[in-house]
Image (tube, grey):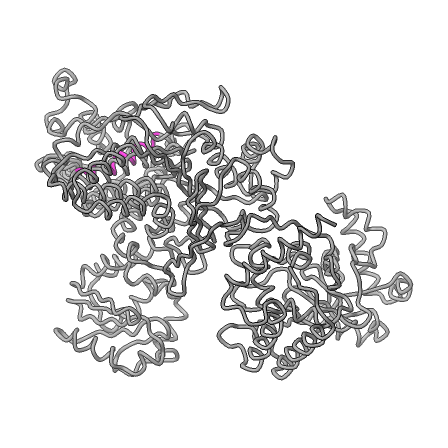
Amino acid sequence: MNPVEIADAVTELAQQPFDASEFPFQFLAAFGNKKTAIDRLRKGNTNHSDVPGAVLQRSNIHIATAAPGEVVDTLTALSKSPKTASQKARFILATDGQELQAEDVTTGETIACDYVDFADHFGFLLPLAGITTVAQIRESSFDIRATGRLNKLYVTLLQDNPEWASADRRADMNHFMARLIFCFFAEDTDIFHAGYKFTETVERMSGGGADNTHEVIAELFRAMNTPLKDREAAGIKTWANGFPYVNGQLFSGNIDVPRFSRTARGYLIHIGNLDWTKINPDIFGSMIQAVADDEERGALGMHYTSVPNILKVLNPLFLDDLRNHLEEAGDNARKLLNLRSRMAKIRVFDPACGSGNFLVIAYKEMRAIEAEINKRRGEPDRRSDIPLTNFRGIELRDFPAEIARLALIIAEYQCDVLYRGQKEALAEFLPLDSQNWITCGNALRLDWLSICPPTGTGVKVRGDDLFETPLDQSEIDFDNAGGETYICGNPPYLGSTWQDAEQKEDLKRIFGQRTKSWKSLDYVAGWLMKAADYGRITNAKSALVSTNSVCQGQQVPILWPLIFGTGHQIAFAHTSFRWANLASNKAGVTVVIVGISNSPPDVRMLFSDGPSGASVAKEAANINAYLVAGRNVIVAPLSKANDDRALMEWGNKPTDGGNFFFTPEERGKLLENAPEADPFLKRFLGAQEFIRGEGRYCLWLEDADRENAERIPELRSRIENVAKVRAESKAAETRPAAAFPHRFRQIQSVAKSSSLVVARVSSEHREFLPIGLENQRTIIGDRNFALYDAPLWNMAVIASRLHWVWVGTVCVRLEMRFSYSNTLGWNTFPLPKLTEQNKTDLTACAENILLAREAHFPATIADLYDPEAMPENLRRAHEENDETLERIYIGRRFKNDTQRLEKLFELYTRMTAKGKAA
């Protein structure tokens, strides 16, 4: 279940008659527990509670119903229960049907409310559904519930009015929803006169039935689009005439309203009766966007972009500097005035603004600083000098662009109420400004300098060519001459495999004349490059959220020399972390934040997430493209290492349609009928077989074996099937392999005595890279790399923490998982010249690791290297291995991974310098 579905289920439960015996099970069902899990709890099979009548679900919640008036005592009993601790319950909860109290055992946070209101606190309990939650998400319970109801209304209206779902009318539908949202907000915040409530008016005037609901709403919209002086001539109905003139393009143009069924009208009234004063413009844009976006509706409620993550971009980009100057100014009136004047000229530009989250947060944070300035200067009621039109954005889709502007308008109003008072805020709010300073268009084809010029006030929107200029876009001038410009945002990522033809063309326009390798770049690279181009002729600073892959592997040598070539350097960065949305723990994308500037500070800041999740800062003289403190070096793939380490090759690729492979059962059955097949069947090692120990065998024939093998009917049939699969393949490179259907399509090598095996993709949670030793009868598949007949000391190097850190930095990662590369990870790994004694010592370390594993047979790599269950003797063997190798590097252990990386990049720089000299 997603958060919106949970909100609906909890709301429904709170409205039902309270049933003390059923409540715990109804509650768990509302948070997504399956019927089978609840049935087991009912029967007592999985109920670990030691409190009479209570239900304890391990690692989740200890819940009990109480006698009337005994909620506090019952919660105390749950808290003191030994089972609460031993079964690792995250929450305890008690209710008597009148009152409900709950506590998060890990944090000590509590809620206490009337039973009928507990749905308002469902965000507090979202971890029960495996959903990550932070304070801002819990506080946004209103937004989630409102979004769920808006979604139901939206879907129902489209079902009742199918013509509004067409491409021609979808923009009208989205515009209609934006108008409704504004009206719900306006009636609850006194923007509309207290005697003229939008929802109440619709309910009253359409009370005779649902048939005229659309006419009532249309008349209200017409009033809001008509100045007061023109209303008599326009014939505005008396009951609508009390609504203010709003316009500001929000109610201009087509004011058609879709027809409402009785169900849709019910949804509308219910939504309007929510408390819209609780709306959070920080995130409401992305929530509303999910309502109107077909692709995103399936993940409804998952679009919360946490404020802390946005501030990871904005704080080091410019907000921290403003706060520092505020602190330095103290109560000095002149310095405070200078800072306020500086802030009034700052331009914040998000060229992938979506529904405006970054712009809204930037605006609200700047208003908070300005309010403190005004307070210190004795001018607390002063009107803001920070114009909304200084917050520019580009968004490809029209509805998010419209919502971004609306979110900024609501943020401005709420800031005015907070810092100046309701009366002053209302006096200046309506009519809305008709300007629309959020540009709807393709950011990679528009001229950013024309949308957010760094100087002057005049604006003339342009495209990179004549045909890309949005002809209907307002050209909104700035109120004052420009000061600083800050580019920020979270552009679409899209790896090269997932880009459509138009997106490929976008990148070609930017990179086609700069590099032949542009097709390998992620889509976000286009924004990074345009930000650098923008900064060539301005003093702008940029900070964008990006996939971590642009700072790893093959993309680094393609992209970063181009960015550095514009004169930009990395001014600050945040290393890989999960971009936390309102989603399950497994969801979300792994990102980095990269701040670039053509005038970076002398001391750069490199941030990373610490153990508690808080950001940890490190000062650096320089940050390279891998987001490591060190010189600007680019690690280029090497076809072969320049020393005596073993050659690492890809495993063997079958391309056989599955015909070469046997389960252990299939192999046994074949050998019962044809024992002479045994020499042709060898153990096969793919990724799962290597890491998880799954049994699998393959048919492995030399050319001389084919005739004998084909005398066995089943093998002959399988070989014929391989020939057919290859001959009919859509891949031109596969079809010629039909001429040798008895062999794997690509055979790299086979060991004479043994092979070292390295998984191509493995979990980032393991503290060491998976590497194993196999005999000559094992065929290594192409999901692994192999070092055939390699000296065992190579294993010690690959199994080290040093190598883990290097691979995690210079190779591509899939999300956070390691994606190993022989040319980038192994051949480039900076290895000091090893003496024979060094190799002997490392060989002994590798043997100790293998012996430690053997002691736990038949445990698999996955079992042995589970970070929470790694056997002590195996961990000790790895510690000794790291001790031995790191002493070869610096004569002692490194203190941390940062030191390891800095040393490795230092050695790599020397290694490549020697190579160039040679």
In the drawing, does residue 156 fall left or right of residue 911?
left
The spot of residue 479 in percent (x, y) is 27, 26
Query: Is 599 a magenta residue?
Result: no
Which of these two is toward me, 916 or 806? 916
Rendered position, 905 above or below 200: below
| Residue located 37% across and 37% down the image | 486
The single residue placed furthest to the top in the displayed view is 233
- Relative to 817, does residue 290 appear above or below in the rendering? above
Q: How many marks?
A: 0
Q: Position of residue 887 (x, y in %)?
A: 60, 72
Choose top left, top right, bottom left or bottom right for residue 166: top left
Q: Quadrant of the N terminus?
A: bottom left
Residue shown at 16%/44% (left/top)?
418
179 magenta-colored: yes
Answer whether residue 756 is visible to the viewer in this image. yes
- 81 vs 664, nearest the viewer: 81
Can residue 208 be seen?
Answer: no
Furthest residue toward left: 195
Rendering coords of residue 350 (x, y %): 38, 37
Question: Relative to residue 614, is residue 250 depicted above or below?
Answer: above
- Residue 781's spot in the image, x, y percent? 71, 62
Residue 859 shown left or right of residue 833 in the figure: left
Give the overall secondary structure of the magenta segment. Answer: helix
Q: Which residues are magenta?
A: 172-186
